[in-house]
Amino acid sequence: MNRQRVRSTQVGVAAAACTALALTLAGCGSSSGHTSSASTGLHLTVEDYYTQPAAAEYDSIYNACAKQLGDTVTISHIAGAALIPKVLQQASSRTMPDVLMLDNPDVAQIAATGALSPLSDYGITGAGYVPGIIAAGSYQGKLYGLAPAVNSLALFYNTDMFKAAGLTPPTTWAELQSDAKALTKSGRYGFAFSGVNTYEGTWQFMPWMWTSGGDEKNIDTPQTAAALQLLTSLVKDGSASKSVDLWTQNDVESQFAAGKAAMMENGPWNIAQLQQVKGLHWASVPLPTPTAGQKVVSPLGGETYTVPQTGDSAKMAAAGKIVACINSDANQVTIAKTVAYVPAKTSVAEQFAKDNPLMAPYVTVAQTARSRTGELGTGWDKAATAIYTAEQQALTGEASPAAALKQAQGQ
């Protein structure tokens, strides 16, 4: 994820498992309350931030969806960090594309400018989708962006190391701490995570904070302090590296793949890479919770598709049909397989988990995952900055978790 591109996606990495997307396009336009219609002969523009090889696979979907309508598309792939500045400029100059992909935390910001049209205008309701996904694509109660597939975070663990130690995967924070300590040996840490001072660090902290009962409206609470204390304690007792405050998620994956970490917090986009590591045996489960039996609350990652306000009603109607097509059941599965995501509709995801056991933990996690912007909307970025700032202070020992959170909340 750049800002998750660090925020949401690792599609460039996971796309090594790409399949022929075009094979599934016969199912276009059937799952989101909208159906395709007769040829319109329009030429539309589509804009996203995907890179190759995933970009080519998404292109196949866009072209096939347009062809189904009798339309054509010109596709622009904008470098991740440059997408939002470009979109804001396009909104100002009234040169928005007809179909715009947005990372889900960006939907509120762009919708707030008035540059997007509600998807209800095109009969797209998101019925059957996980509630958190609808929240992630909504602004002030209206659905503006719909994700065909999503991702989140879980716990990867080295099965050989656990077997040798006679351990089972931890389900509670206490078990995580004891397992991590037991698995820490010379040249190996028990647990690895990213505590870097960017939105990526915040993304990785959210499962601990939300599952503990913490809330981004006010991070100066005992619940959030408990979550930060957990991670800080793992570093302090040597079960996690002191370098986690510098590690990105890619760094974490590298440590795990090299056998230098027995467990790691990471996303499903790593699966394709890990499968290529000879001699590495692993599995994944939902992240541990404060007490047994709790549901983990992780952040939702993933890209949504929107219909910008271009002023051309015919093209906007056609764009709505393309968005519906991209979100068809068949394309949800195809995209999920391509980039190791979870299909957005609950029924589709449940079958996907049965067909793809390695993705089953992520299907479970996605059902209770939360939107990062669902509560604060455009105020999320400020909260996210405060969270990773406090985490940095605590991990580096500059302040206690409680003091770091109190200071960050006050800024």
Image (cartoon, grey):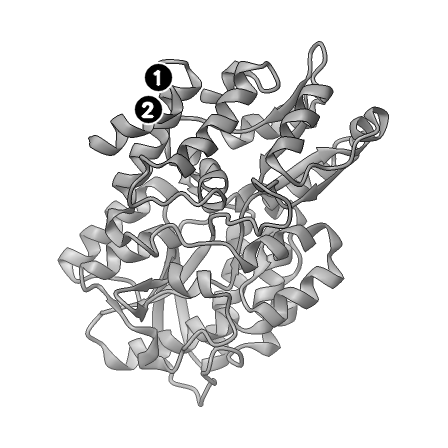
Q: Is residue 401 above or below residue 87?
A: above
Labelled disc at residue 145? none
**Considering the numbered disc 2 on the image, is that residue within a helix, a strand or a loop?**
helix
Q: Are marks 2 and 1 in contact (CB under 8 Å)?
A: yes
Measuring from the top left, give residue 302's x and y in whole percent: 47, 53
Q: Is residue 341 above or below residue 408?
A: below
- Residue visible at 46% across and 36% down in the picture: 205
Q: Residue furthest bottom?
A: 38
- Residue visible at 68% across and 44% down in the picture: 285
- The amino acid sitting under disc 1 is Ala
Labelled disc at residue 399? 1
Residue 37 horizontal side relative to residue 316, left or right: right
Q: Is residue 202 visible?
A: yes
Can you tell which quarter of the image residue 16 is in? top right
Residue 372 horizontal side relative to residue 118, left or right: right
- Residue visible at 59% across and 14% down in the picture: 238
Neighbour class for label 2 at 10 Å: few (<14), some, many (≥20)? many
User: Looking at the figure, which quarter contains the N terminus?
Assistant: top left
Residue to which mark 2 is pinned: 404
**Considering the numbered disc 1 on the image, is that residue within a helix, a strand or a loop?**
loop
